[in-house]
Image (tube, rainbow, N blue to C red):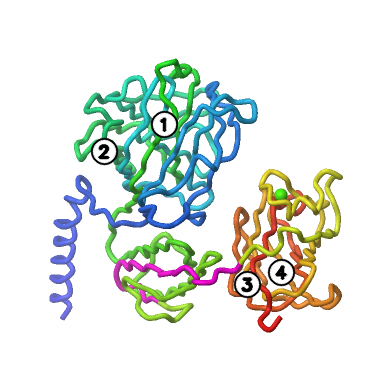
Amino acid sequence: MRIKLKLTFGFLLAAALFVAAPCFSEPEWVLLWEDQFNGRELDEARWRVEDAALIKNNEQQYYSPEEVYLENAMLVIRSQKIARNGRQYTSGLVETAGKFSRKYGRFEARARLPRGKGIWPAFWMLPESGDWPPEIDIFELLGHAPSTIYMTCHWGTWPDKKHKGRMFTGPDFTAGFHDFALEWEPHEIRWYIDGQMAHRVRENIPHEPFYLILNTAVGGNWPGSPSSTTVFPQYFYIDYVRVYAQEFPNAWYLIHSADNGRITASPLLDVYPSGMQVTLTADPAIGYEFVGWSGDVGGGENPTVVKMDRHKKVEAIFRGLSNPPALISGNASVTVSSLESAELAGANLTDGNLRTRWSSRFADPQWACIDLGQEYLIDAVRLEWEAAYARNYELQVSQDGKTWNTVRANNSGWGQTEEITGLNTIARYVQLYGIERATEFGYSLWEIEVFGREPEGR
Ligand SMILES: [Ca+2]
């Protein structure tokens, strides 16, 4: 028995070495995260959209959410010659900061790039930690030279920053779609253009999670300003973005995706040990309903449980409601517990303007109460948080503004846009009750939107 065990172990070890050795040069990649841009709107669970005049490289664009949209199952970043907020041009930037980041992996996009003097499209990555450098540029292109791709790594410690890259000259990358990929391993980073390796580095490899960025800058130190030959608008089309992780023995990835809604996995791990049970919850976007699961989980149970005994790919199917709830808080009056300053008033919460906000004093608890003016059947609430969000809050409703009923509690708030759906409650007042702040600042929101309809029988 003892001998047999020894032999078996020796055989397994040899087999493992035999199998493992080639993996270093040619890793097996497992699809971990993707966006095919098939939804009606850009998925806020995956992407953050910039709305700012970033001060970088003397660039001349204002990054406006209006310049980022989905069309024909593609992400479109449009650049126009429109003056806004002190800048001469509008353009778009999307990133996965705070939503998805990854250390090592294969990162790819299929895209058709914009062109013209002063036009500077890029697909790149920055550390989730907020440090700079490092930076990895999967591709950059200067619109006056539409056949040249730049691939660059930045490293060092500010202000002692260094970078090294390579140019690749090929076809006109603004005339059709091309495949761009980056394979990042602990010992090496490789760049691929249309499946061919175009660049490789083995020094100054970063070892921390990075998030993804897609944008078109206009003007700036590197490309120079647009000229009279630059045609506007310009369009940066992205067919898909995919991220793959390397395969490891007995470690399983849970790959989930949803258009028009989101999936929450609990526990949430990068990689799962064999046999672990994971609970999946599907939450539709406002105006949608959950229909069922597809992929490696079936049925319509929500939440559902998936057992991790191999890589699992799960999709949640949502369908648009035939009678979606309407915005009912457009003319609502607002009362709040306190103000940070007079101009950050409660009325800013329902003015339909995503540049005006309410901010409370820097203390707990705080509340904002929306008076809808009459009773409605309330279906959903959308919270548009500024950077100072709530970690722990309750959503409360009331018929009379005195007696409150908690309809949803959230002690793991993550800020940005939070949609609370499926409320199905009749009330005149809706109150956001903040219990614990996530930052040292107050509670700060651009907008609170309530969706619903007239109660039946009125
Ligand atoms: Ca507002």
Q: Earlier in the sequence, mark 1 or mark 2?
A: 2
Q: Earlier in the sequence, mark 3 or mark 4?
A: 3
| Neighbour tally class for label 4: few under 14, some 14-19, many 20 plus, Cα within 10 Å | some
The residue singled out by tag 1 in the image is 234
Label 2, secondary structure: give it. Answer: strand
| Neighbour tally class for label 2: few under 14, some 14-19, many 20 plus, Cα within 10 Å | some
Query: Main SS type for the magenta part?
Result: strand
State yes or no: discs 1 and 4 in contact (Cβ < 8 Å): no
The residue singled out by tag 2 in the image is 178
Is residue 311 found inside the magenta-colored segment of the image?
yes
Is residue 200 found inside the magenta-colored segment of the image?
no
- Please state which amino acid type lies under the numbered disc 2: His
Image position, residue 59 (x, y; %): 53, 24
In front here: 417 or 174?
174
Which part of the image, by quadrant, shows the C terminus? bottom right
Label 3, secondary structure: give it. Answer: strand
Identify the residue at horizontal 51%, vertical 27% (top origin): 81
State yes or no: discs 1 and 3 in contact (Cβ < 8 Å): no
- Please state which amino acid type lies under the numbered disc 1: Gln
Image position, residue 379 (x, y; %): 62, 72
The residue singled out by tag 4 in the image is 394
Q: Earlier in the sequence, mark 2 or mark 3?
A: 2
Q: Which residues are magenta?
A: 306-325
- Please state which amino acid type lies under the numbered disc 4: Glu
Asked whether, in this view, residue 412 is left or right of residue 333, the answer is left
- Please state which amino acid type lies under the numbered disc 3: Asp
Ligand 1 within 8 A of label 3's CB? Answer: no
Asked whether, in this view, residue 310 is left or right of residue 418, the answer is left
Asked whether, in this view, residue 28 is left or right of residue 418, the answer is left
Label 4, secondary structure: give it. Answer: strand
Q: CA distance from mark 1 to mark 4?
A: 44 Å
